[in-house]
Image (tube, grey):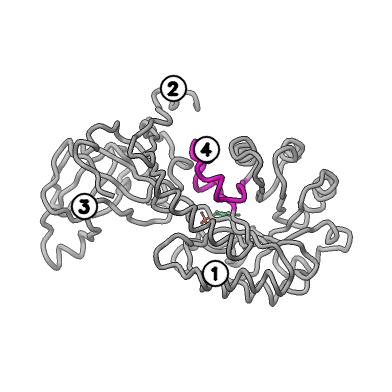
């Protein structure tokens, strides 16, 4: 994507610019996977809930996945006629009957929760599932995204299953669900399925469906789709199951930008640019994960290394205007010196941003715009002072 200077100056900053064409390109990959394997793919809304674009995605997806009542309602309202699935760490009694009016599949996190709500879900004609924990960690580096770590609260281990499950409640189950991956390729899924089969294989013969959760980076260029297809068809055929996947990231991967303006440039041994976008407020995963997001026209740099190696010409540390010392987005090398007033474009900003941002320091929320397929830009949502004040 190549944005002209004029185009960038026409945008309000900071803003998220969602890319309709990139979204459709992703959705087409997911659609053809469903056609070839018969699996069903849901949008995990916690990664991307910009429902103005649900009509664009709906023709390619089987429905939505929700983390609780509000996302379930959003999926039900904004992707009408499609499947609505929900998994929540624990449901609240007072929410449950409303949830039943939205969801088709209800997945429980514990056998306690199955015992508490399973009968009412079943008698309301819902498809009932239980999240399992195959205790198979496949990722290094991001322990906060590992639901298979010892002591995890997410999913039922085989040991818990053996001590708590009874025939009465087993009978309520239509399917099993696992979610153990994060930004991973299909080799990690293959390894996970071996653990699932080893621990829960006998149980799977009695189920109608198996949900592989999210974390599959299917739309990334180096993703091994043929291996994913083998995984799906193997489980489908061996256990006679319907297979669901519920990726969030893969649906909206690289399908949006965060456009920001340079407010100030200062030098404290190193070059520093202060932006009207903030890591802490507008791209919290940069600090939580942490990672350095891609930026148009720049490459990532590491100021500590550069000092030792090549000097640091046109290398800048980019940070927000908040009070947080650690509100740093990253170090980048540019072709030429930066200027105050210049616009910068962070890439891959559709996921885990508009759903996670905040107004810490009273920072304004970025407006949300969409770049339509025909090249026209439409504003979806503007934010102002009241959006800050009304939450408080
Ligand atoms: C987070 C999550 C997803 C989506 O994960 P991505 O990494 O965005 O693909 C799907 N299902 C469940 C249960 C999740 O918690």
Q: Is mark 2 within 8 Å of ligand 1?
A: no
How many numbered discs, if any? 4
Q: Tag 2, which secondary structure? A: helix
Name the residue carrying label 1.
Answer: 228
Looking at the image, is 327 positioned above or below residue 202?
A: above
Gap between marks 4 and 1, in whole Å? Answer: 28 Å
Task: Examine the rendering and report whether any part of residue 361 can be seen.
Answer: no
Residue at 15% in and 67% down: 308
Say whether disc 4 or disc 1 marks the residue closer to the N-terminus: 4
Say whether disc 4 or disc 3 marks the residue closer to the N-terminus: 4
For marks 4 and 2, give the one nearer the viewer: 4
Q: Tag 4, which secondary structure? A: helix
Say whether disc 2 or disc 3 marks the residue closer to the N-terminus: 3
Mark 3, other Cα within 10 Å: few <14 / some 14–19 / many ≥20: few
Is 61 within the magenta? yes
Say whether disc 1 or disc 2 marks the residue closer to the N-terminus: 1
Name the residue carrying label 2.
Answer: 386
Say whether disc 1 or disc 3 marks the residue closer to the N-terminus: 1
Name the residue carrying label 4.
Answer: 51
Name the residue carrying label 3.
Answer: 297
Q: Tag 3, which secondary structure? A: loop
Gap between marks 1 and 2, in whole Å? Answer: 46 Å
Gap between marks 1 and 3, in whole Å? Answer: 34 Å
Residue at 38% in and 46% down: 256
Q: Magenta residues, as a range?
A: 42-67
Q: Tag 1, which secondary structure? A: helix
């Amino acid at each position: 994507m190549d944005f002209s200077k004029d185009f960038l100056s026409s945008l309000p900053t900071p803003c998220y610019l969602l890319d309709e064409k990139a979204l459709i390109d992703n959705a087409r990959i997911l659609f053809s996977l469903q056609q070839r394997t018969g699996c069903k793919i849901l949008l995990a809304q916690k990664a991307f809930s910009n429902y103005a674009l649900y009509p664009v995605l709906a023709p390619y997806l089987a429905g939505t996945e929700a983390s609780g009542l509000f996302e379930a309602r959003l999926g039900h309202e904004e992707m009408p006629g499609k499947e609505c699935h929900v998994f929540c760490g624990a449901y609240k009694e007072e929410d449950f009957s409303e949830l039943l009016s939205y969801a088709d599949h209800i997945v429980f996190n514990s056998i306690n929760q199955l015992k508490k709500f399973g009968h009412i879900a079943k008698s309301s004609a819902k498809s009932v599932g239980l999240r399992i924990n195959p205790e198979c960690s496949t990722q290094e580096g991001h322990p906060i995204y590992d639901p298979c770590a010892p002591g995890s609260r997410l999913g039922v281990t085989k040991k818990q299953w053996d001590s708590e499950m009874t025939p009465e409640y087993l009978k309520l189950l239509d399917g099993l669900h696992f979610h153990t991956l994060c930004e991973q390729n299909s080799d990690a899924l293959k390894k996970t399925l071996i653990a699932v089969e080893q621990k829960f294989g006998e149980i799977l013969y009695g189920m109608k469906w198996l949900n592989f959760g999210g974390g599959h980076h299917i739309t990334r260029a180096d993703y091994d789709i043929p291996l994913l297809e083998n995984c799906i068809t193997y489980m489908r055929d061996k256990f006679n199951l319907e297979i669901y996947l519920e990726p969030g990231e893969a649906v909206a991967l690289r399908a949006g930008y965060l456009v920001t303006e340079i407010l100030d440039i200062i030098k404290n041994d190193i070059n520093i640019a202060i932006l009207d976008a903030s890591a802490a407020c507008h791209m919290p995963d940069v600090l939580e994960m942490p990672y350095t997001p891609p930026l148009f026209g720049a490459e990532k740099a590491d100021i500590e290394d550069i000092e030792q190696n090549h000097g640091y010409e046109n290398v800048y540390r980019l940070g927000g205007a908040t009070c947080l010392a650690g509100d740093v987005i990253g170090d980048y090398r540019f072709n030429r010196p930066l200027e105050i007033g210049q616009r910068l474009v962070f890439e891959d900003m559709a996921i885990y941003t508009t759903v996670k941002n905040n107004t810490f320091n009273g920072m304004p929320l970025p407006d949300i715009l969409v770049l339509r397929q025909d090249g026209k830009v439409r504003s979806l949502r503007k934010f102002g002072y009241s959006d800050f004040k009304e939450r408080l």
